[in-house]
Every structure is written in structure tokens, then in C-alpha cells.
Image (cartoon, rainbow, N blue to C red):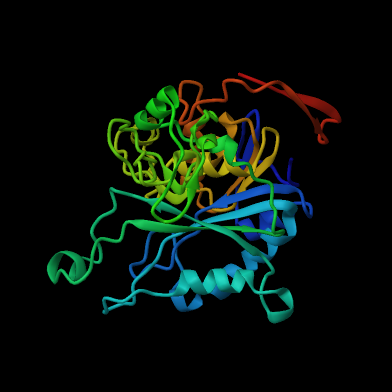
Amino acid sequence: MRLNCNPYYETKFGAAYLGNSLELMAGILDESIDLICTSPPFALVRKKEYGNVDADEYVEWFKDYAAHFYRILKPTGSLVIDIGGSWIKGMPVRSLYHFELVVALCKPKEKGGLGFYLAQELYWYNPAKLPTPAEWVTIRRERVKDSVNTIWWLSKEPHPKANNRRVLKPYSDAMKNLLKNGYTPNLRPSGHDISNKFGKDRGGAIPPNIIDGRCNTNKEEIGQQTFIQETLFEDLVQPVNVISASNTASNDYYQRRCKQEGFKPHPARFPQALPKFVINLCTEPGDIVLEPFAGSNMTGRVAETLQRRWLAFEIDENYIKSSKLRFEENAPLVVEPPADLPPIRIENADHNQLLELGLF
């Protein structure tokens, strides 16, 4: 997909554009996007250099973007918004702005809303978040560390395109042992009857709605299923809605190249685990992913590797210029490319030909 303006840079599967996403989205056809995966500026108490709106103005500010999102999404498409919570200035109490936002987005149009459905909440647990606000967490000790972002998964229909088989988690050692040695069906104390069908190998455990992206596989992680005789088997544990991943890598390829080129890295970067989970869950190879607040364009980089077509919009030229570093020939992949993807053919309307997608 191309817009009626020149991209800042292009890749095999996508293109990044410099400009206001409200203006750029005006050039996107109705019902043409499969997934919008984004992290807009949050309504934080402390102003950030990339710009953020006050909490009491946030919902009205976001509605203009949401109207475009609804228009350009396919009927089976999804809108996934990573949005952090905030505190009320001067008090140890939370703002409700991100809840007010999802209510406004999901109200029926005839009642003044945007008409989305809330498909599910996901959660991103960031163990590296600083203990803020310091006044209430580290000084007075009245609150605990806030380390979870809510991710609203919205859709235009009750049944958007999604398949959790594409995001299965590896079985734990306990589950592997159970599959090897078998299991005797029994009745749980809660009354649930666990039959022997839960001892079958289905290729992995259904993930929870906690997106789990930490690299230390020898450590028990949030969202990791464990086998306890009195609980349901991993196959029955639904994907948890918490993504566990930090975004503070100080010496990854992007950071090193930014330093070498004299760019200031984007201060609020996506962890690769978040777009990887969402893109795999909600799209198939060849589908189109949009990131309207691209920042360092981690979403585009992941989409490229997973062979999804993508568009990225960013209003700050320094950030879009530095995001191009992610696509350099020598840049390491941030996620593993699909190992068993058969070639598929999709129509490339711009060039009136078929584009074959397959392994690199």
C-alpha cells in the first residue's frame, strides 16, 4: 500500500512516513487495514519531550484519531492500544483517563461513542519500570511500584480475525513430564472434572493475556503456566493478559547506532514482545499493519520480519530518521522469522502484479 506522498524510507514489506498521522491517515482507503498496533503518548503528570496531552483533555484529543482508525480498519480488523496509567498530580491516587478512553471508544455510535468492541484487555508487565511517583512509593511508602501498562484490544466486530495457536507458549518441564508419563483423570476440589484429554500434546500451551518477553528462560515468569496437581492443565490455562518485557536495553543495536550517528533514541520504545504477540495473534502473512505513532518503529521492524505489510507514521523527523537504523542490512532481527511459512501470493495493486511472500 502506498500513500499519495513519498515515504521517508521503504523496505520489502513496508514504508515509513514523516508527518501528522491524522493527515496521513486521510490518504488510506476505507476498510483496508488489518491491524493498528500503537502506543500513543500517555497522559502523564510530567511532560515528556515527545509530547503528551493532559488527562482531562485526552479522550477528546484521541477521538479524532479513533474515528480514522474505525474507518480504515477492515470489519475483521483489530485496534490494539498500549496505554499507561497516570496519577493525579499531588495525590497518591490514580487517574481514570485510560478507563474513560476505552468507555468512550466502545460506546455505541448512537450514544456518542466510536462503536468499537472491547475484545480483551492485555497487560504489559515491565519489570524495569522506575518506582514512581517517588513521593508515594519510595519516600512515604504509601503505594507499590506501578509496573503494568494496560493494552486495550478493540475490534469493529465481536469476532475479529485472531488465532491463539499462533502465540502458543512452550510447555513447562512439568507439563512435558506429564505428557511423557501420562495423567490419571481426577476431580478437582472446585468440582471441575479433569479428563485425560488434557494430557494430549497440542504443540504448546495457550498463552495467557500477559505478554511474556523476558529472555531468561530459566526463571519463573509472569504468565508462565505451571503444573500443580490441584489446578487445571496448561492446555486449559487461557493466554494471560500480561506482557512481561522490559524496554530499557542500553546497548542494543538501535541504541549503539543512534549513538554512532548522533541521534537521540526515542525514550519510550516498545519491547519487541508486544508487537510480536499482537501481530501473530491478529494477522497472517501479507496482512497490513499500521503504527500511527511509530517512534523508533519497533512495530514496523517486527512486522517486516513476520512478513506482514506495514505502514508507520511519525511526526518527529529525528525519531523517524533514527528508526531507519533498525532496517540496516547488518541489523540483527528483533524476533525470529517464521520457520515454516509457505510462500503466498498477494496482489500488489500499485504495480499491477503479484508479490510472492516466503522465507527470506
Q: Judge whether residue 201 can be spotted in this image.
A: yes
- Please identify the quarter of the rendering in which residue 64 is found: bottom right
- Please identify the quarter of the rendering in which residue 334 is found: top left
Residue 260 x/y as whole percent: 35, 31
Which residue occupies the extreme left position in the image? 139
Closer to the camera in the image, 262 or 279:
279
Which residue occupies the extreme right position in the image? 352
- Where is the N terminus found, in terms of image quarters? top right
- Where is the C terminus found, in terms of image quarters? top right
Residue 356 x/y as whole percent: 75, 23
Q: Is residue 64 left or right of residue 196?
A: right
Q: Is residue 291 left or right of residue 213?
A: right
Closer to the camera in the image, 252 or 191:
191
- Count the marks: how many? 0
The residue at 79%/55% (across/down) is 30
Closer to the camera in the image, 65 or 117:
117
The residue at 50%/39% (across/down) is 235
Q: Is residue 139 left or right of residue 48?
A: left
Q: Judge whether residue 260 can be spotted in this image.
A: no
Image vertical order of residue 59 relative to residue 81, above or below: below
Residue 125 x/y as whole percent: 36, 51
